[in-house]
Image (cartoon, rainbow, N blue to C red):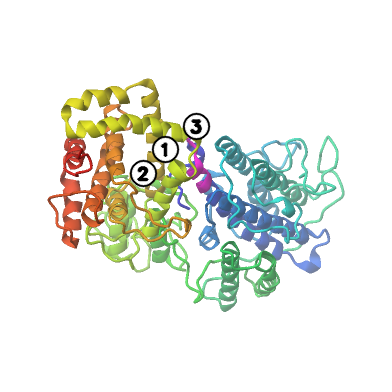
């Protein structure tokens, strides 16, 4: 997940459509995280020794979770996001739930037991309203799934976006209660869909039942609780687990199959084909019922064979050749760090430190303490214990004979990670551990940055989001603020040519109305940049994006076929954007960020003038590949204090203000 900061810690007033999209991507991950453990527990039950049909109960819960997954995918599509089922599924278990839901809860694949019910499944489905006295289950006080979905809905209700039906999947053919209601076209339909998820999982605020069935069925939390208590819940108040007896079934207590077991590999391939089939459905190329339920009998048969032979399914996500799936294209640098650690360990059992990184969010990873030592020293890659452990530097490297070392190199008793991979992790820590676009070893080297270029699709996604809130789907309030800002900044154009006009511009941007407009738009723009490139924003990556945006070098946007090119429309907009940045610095609105942001603006406008025909004049650089490299070097060398003046002087020499 491209979780840049803790989604739930973002102040309510700062939650925008980008926050909703990221949250709904996390919701897809959340539902994907719970289905395999539920199926594993159901399949672990010996069908011949299950007098209370517990396997059917748990399978039914897993099927409803599949519906919740489909709802989350449709909600994401409705706000113009796109689900990625293959990469949303946990790459390995144990894992943790995304977005800090039940932070610290380890979700693993395990045979059914009272402990699994009480300490994992009921915790996952824990209701916000505890309606039954329960001497076995203690409320966790954690951030709950119900609250997470409530926050998503509240933000949707506040934003009032126009929902898109393009790409949503018709759920009416899915034979699950409530599916007919789940195409999202209005805020009321979004409420209905989200309430179905939460009510089926935790019940309503007044009863332990959902309200989708007629008569209502117990919610998942209470179905799990009945098995744990060994008795049905009474149907009326005061609710208690004193009804008909429920007998715990006999289970096959086995662990997931190792990666090299042929039957385990076959299951992993079948499971991964199911994920690909789901992706095809949301890509408009498949049938949902076939994808969701067509493969289930085969998976169940393979799982039964595994359990009979003494193993369970591992639910590994693999490619067609059975190789582990890496992070998604254009994924975060943090995702690549995790992949490097996974690759270093391979399928071997973890020693000493354990596979501590699996299932952690970026923020959890950064704060992690292993063997009583902080994992990272942010900003100091070489001094971080993770890098020292990978390189075998004291206090690590006892097995390598390192003087003073007391701990084995990581990974213990296995070949070391490559120097290139360790250098990547060290550089990531030096840069502040950002969740910025990843470096793909197959991507060509940039002639201008001297480093690997990110997937240009990452830049396209950023400029698309920027266009969405500032133009294509701008609210009337946003339009008003943009008009206020642009009206003030038209005076900057006079100032850029003649310094005697400076005070008129300063007066215009300093009114209460103008200051409020600058502040709101500055915050929104900064959030959009950080949402796509991480915190802190990596300068080279952003320069790469604005260079391509400036010289019309970005690929067509497949999600905006009506206007697929991302480039600057009117050339004067570069300079008005420069005026905006200078105004923010002068008004002390996130001045550090907007000083920083003047560099990509300068990079983009110079590329536009040099490489797009008949736009405006740029002097001092040749219109060649060497010119791009010269521009890239130049914009990094300009002193912070000179950036605003450089942009003004470029406007004065551009020819745009002539006459």
The residues bearing labels 3 and 2 have C-alpha atoms spaced at a distance of 20 Å
Q: Secondary structure at mark 2?
A: loop
Residue 593 percent coordinates (x, y): 30, 37
The quarter of the image holding the C terminus is top left
Q: Residues within 10 Å of mark 2 (few under 14, many from 20)?
A: some
398 or 127: which is nearer to us?
127
Q: Is residue 387 left or right of residue 53?
A: left
Residue 284 percent coordinates (x, y): 59, 64
Q: Which residues are magenta?
A: 11-22
The residues bearing labels 2 and 1 have C-alpha atoms spaced at a distance of 15 Å
551 or 658: which is nearer to us?
658
Q: Vertically, is 577 above or below 357?
A: above
- Which picture quadrant has residue 233? top right
Furthest toward the right, the residue is 244
The residues bearing labels 1 and 3 have C-alpha atoms spaced at a distance of 11 Å
Mark 1, residue position: 524
- Which picture quadrant has residue 654? top left
Magenta stretch: helix, strand or loop mostly: helix
């Amino acid at each position: 997940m491209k979780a840049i900061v803790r989604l739930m810690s973002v102040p309510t007033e700062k939650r925008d459509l980008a926050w909703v999209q990221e949250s709904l991507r996390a919701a897809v991950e959340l539902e994907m995280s719970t289905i395999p453990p539920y199926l594993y527990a159901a399949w672990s039950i010996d069908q011949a020794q299950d007098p209370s049909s517990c396997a059917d109960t748990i399978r039914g819960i897993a099927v409803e979770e599949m519906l919740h997954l489909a709802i989350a995918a449709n909600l994401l599509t409705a706000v113009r996001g796109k689900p990625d089922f293959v990469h949303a599924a946990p790459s390995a278990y144990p894992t943790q739930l995304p977005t800090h839901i039940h932070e610290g809860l380890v979700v693993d694949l395990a045979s059914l037991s009272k402990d699994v019910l009480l300490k994992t499944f009921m915790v996952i489905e824990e209701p916000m309203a505890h309606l039954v006295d329960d001497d076995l289950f203690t409320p966790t006080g954690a951030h709950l799934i119900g609250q997470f979905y409530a926050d998503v809905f509240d933000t949707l209700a506040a934003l009032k976006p126009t929902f898109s039906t393009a790409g949503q999947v018709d759920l009416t053919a899915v034979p699950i209660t409530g599916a007919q209601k789940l195409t999202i076209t209005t805020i009321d339909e979004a409420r209905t869909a989200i309430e179905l998820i939460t009510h089926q999982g935790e019940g309503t605020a007044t009863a332990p039942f959902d309200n989708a069935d007629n008569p209502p069925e117990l919610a998942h939390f209470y179905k799990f609780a009945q098995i744990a208590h060994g008795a049905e819940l009474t149907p009326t108040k005061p609710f208690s687990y004193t009804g008909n007896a429920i007998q715990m079934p006999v289970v096959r207590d086995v662990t997931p199959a190792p990666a090299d077991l042929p039957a385990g590999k076959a299951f992993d391939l079948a499971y991964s084909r199911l994920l690909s089939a789901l992706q095809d459905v949301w890509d408009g190329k498949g049938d949902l019922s076939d994808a969701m339920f067509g493969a289930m009998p085969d998976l169940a048969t393979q799982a039964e064979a595994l359990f009979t032979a003494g193993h369970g399914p591992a639910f590994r996500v693999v490619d067609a050749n059975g190789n582990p799936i890496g992070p998604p294209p254009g994924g975060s640098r943090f995702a690549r760090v995790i992949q490097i650690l996974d690759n270093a360990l391979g399928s071997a059992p973890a020693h000493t430190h354990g596979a501590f990184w699996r299932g952690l969010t970026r923020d959890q990873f950064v704060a992690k303490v292993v063997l009583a030592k902080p994992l990272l020293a942010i900003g100091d890659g070489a001094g971080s214990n993770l890098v020292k452990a990978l390189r075998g530097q004291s206090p690590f490297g006892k097995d390598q004979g390192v003087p003073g070392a007391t701990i084995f190199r990581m990974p213990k008793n296995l070949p070391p990670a490559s120097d290139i991979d360790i250098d990547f992790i060290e550089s990531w820590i030096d840069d502040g551990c950002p969740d910025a676009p990843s470096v793909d070893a197959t991507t060509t080297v940039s002639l201008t940055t001297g480093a690997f270029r990110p997937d240009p699709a990452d830049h396209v996604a950023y400029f698309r989001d920027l266009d969405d809130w500032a133009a294509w789907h701008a609210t009337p309030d946003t339009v008003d603020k943009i008009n206020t800002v642009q009206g003030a900044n038209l005076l900057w154009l006079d100032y850029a040519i003649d310094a005697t006009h400076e005070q008129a511009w300063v007066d215009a941007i300093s009114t209460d109305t103008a200051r409020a407009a600058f502040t709101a738009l500055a915050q929104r723009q900064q959030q959009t940049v950080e949402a796509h490139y991480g915190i802190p924003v990596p300068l080279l990556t952003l320069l790469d994006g604005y260079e391509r945006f400036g010289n019309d070098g970005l690929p067509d946007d497949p999600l905006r076929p009506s206007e697929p090119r991302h480039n600057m429309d009117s050339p004067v907009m570069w300079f008005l954007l420069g005026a905006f940045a200078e105004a923010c610095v002068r008004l002390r609105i996130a001045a550090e960020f907007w000083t920083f942001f003047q560099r990509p603006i300068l990079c983009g406008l110079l590329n536009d003038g040099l490489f797009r025909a008949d736009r405006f004049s740029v002097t001092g650089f040749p219109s060649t590949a060497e010119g791009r490299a010269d521009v890239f070097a130049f914009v990094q060398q300009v002193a912070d204090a000179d950036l605003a003046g450089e942009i003004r002087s470029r406007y004065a020499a551009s020819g745009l203000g002539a006459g």
